[in-house]
Image (cartoon, helix red, strand yellow):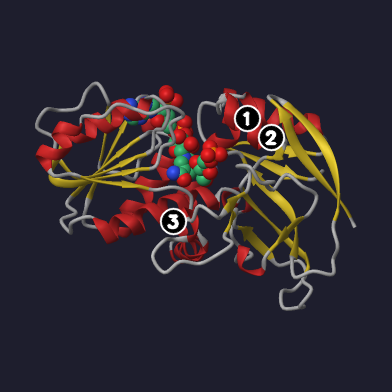
């Protein structure tokens, strides 16, 4: 069959590529239904990802957050029409220590390897997780971003000390919202404080204990552990504030992506004995855990609906551009594409 792949060829410019794909293979074929735009996709779309990465990774289909329905399973194990979330990480080996998303041999969709902006996505059997029918598709579209918070929390639990009275989350955007919501659901007796730049965004965080604008943090406020969900140059300011507000021996989980190295106060990291935990992408276990968590906590899913921002029906390449442009000017939430191309 001929599959159409919608690739970014240069900033703000997409082209259709026709790829001949055989159904005589082990791949399960999925028709995407709802796709969501990540900050990483925007860095490629706008060309801010950096000259070298743009040159080596393009042309490629963007998008690594998405769901769809199974249209063909060569083994006949998965019913046609089953709703699934697609896993963008593609491991090529296993390791007893290193998780699939940290293996340098793994490929990642929409980062040098074609993402989900295709008519049909061909996936290895273990690269999809079945979704319950009742789950809201616009929320499910960005499950991958929820797995990022899940993955970071799992790493935090394995590496940080066990006093968890007060958590601080820096970042009043999508990932900050998801992380603080997940912390509140997982640690019912702990206090969660969110630190952000915009009062109108912080107003959405009604479920946390306290919120502060980053230039109004009380001097006597201290936290046990911190999560960074800012990215870019802002992460430098955020990480240095975390270092100041943490009790000794606390931890900092970094999730935000920065294009350039950031300067952090290593002297105080040493003096306070802080642990820094880097966290990037996610793997199958995180997807399975996240879908289970969403099944068990309907109120968690309900809160995530607040994050559904722009919804754009996509039938043409111009609609794709419209979705990315709307996302750039949107002041809150995730942009979801209803994939009907
Ligand atoms: N590790 C991983 O695997 C993943 C990482 N990410 C990364 O996480 C980061 C956040 O993503 P996302 O939530 O979607 O992006 P958002 O833009 O929605 O969120 C970032 C928020 O942080 C605010 N902010 C800026 N500076 C500070 C500061 N010093 N302290 C507190 N808040 C601040 C921003 O405000 P304003 O807009 O006003 O500047 C914005 O509201 C990005 O870098 C993204 O690439 C995303 C997915 C996976
Ligand atoms: O968003 C992400 C995962 O959900 C990661 O931040 C993204 O994969 C980083 O990729 P790149 O190196 O291409 O910017
Ligand atoms: Zn992403």
Q: Is residue 205 above or below residue 97?
A: above
Given this view, does label 3 or label 1 mark the residue nearer the observer? 1
Given this view, does label 2 or label 3 mark the residue nearer the observer? 2
Give the residue at mark 3. 299
The residue positioned 65% from the left and 29% from the top of the image is: 55
**Which SS class for mark 3?**
helix
Residue 31 lies, in percent from the top left, at 76, 56
Is residue 38 found left or right of 63 in the rendered image?
left
* Quarter of the figure with residue 193: top left
* Quarter of the figure with residue 222: top left
Residue 312 lies, in percent from the top left, at 70, 36
The residue positioned 38% from the left and 28% from the top of the image is: 261
* Quarter of the figure with residue 262: top left
The residue positioned 69% from the left and 48% from the top of the image is: 116
Residue 323 lies, in percent from the top left, at 68, 32
Give the residue at mark 1. 54
Give the residue at mark 2. 58
Front one among 290 and 40: 40
If you read the primary sequence from the N terminus, does the residue marked by circle 2 or circle 3 appear first? 2
């Amino acid at each position: 069959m001929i599959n159409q792949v919608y690739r970014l060829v240069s900033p703000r410019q997409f082209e259709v590529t026709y790829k001949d794909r055989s159904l005589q293979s082990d791949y399960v074929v999925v028709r995407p239904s709802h796709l969501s735009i990540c900050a990483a996709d925007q860095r490629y779309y706008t060309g801010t990802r950096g000259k070298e990465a743009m040159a080596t990774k393009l042309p490629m289909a963007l998008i690594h957050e998405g769901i769809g329905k199974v249209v063909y399973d060569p083994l006949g194990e998965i019913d046609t029409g089953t709703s699934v979330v697609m896993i963008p990480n593609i491991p090529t080996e296993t390791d007893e220590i290193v998780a699939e998303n940290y293996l340098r041999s793994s490929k990642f969709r929409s980062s040098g390897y074609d993402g989900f902006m295709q008519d049909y996505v061909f996936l290895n059997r273990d690269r999809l997780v079945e979704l319950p029918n009742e789950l809201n598709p616009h929320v499910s579209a960005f499950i991958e971003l929820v797995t990022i918070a899940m993955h970071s929390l799992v790493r935090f639990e394995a590496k940080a000390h066990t006093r968890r009275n007060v958590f601080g989350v820096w970042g009043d955007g999508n990932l900050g919202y998801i992380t603080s919501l997940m912390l509140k659901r997982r640690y019912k007796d702990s206090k969660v404080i969110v630190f952000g730049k915009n009062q109108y965004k912080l107003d959405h965080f009604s479920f946390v204990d306290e919120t502060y604008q980053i230039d109004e943090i009380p001097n006597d406020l201290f936290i046990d552990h911190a999560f960074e969900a800012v990215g870019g140059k802002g992460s430098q300011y955020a990480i240095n504030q975390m270092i100041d507000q943490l009790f000794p021996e606390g931890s900092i989980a970094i999730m935000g992506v920065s294009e350039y190295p950031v300067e952090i106060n290593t002297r105080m990291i040493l003096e306070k004995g802080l642990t820094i935990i880097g966290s990037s992408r996610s793997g199958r276990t995180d997807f399975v855990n996240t879908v289970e968590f969403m099944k068990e906590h309907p109120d968690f899913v309900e809160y995530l609906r607040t994050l559904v921002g722009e919804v754009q029906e996509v039938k043409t390449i111009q609609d794709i551009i419209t979705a990315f442009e709307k996302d750039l000017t949107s002041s809150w939430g995730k942009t979801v594409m209803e994939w009907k191309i």
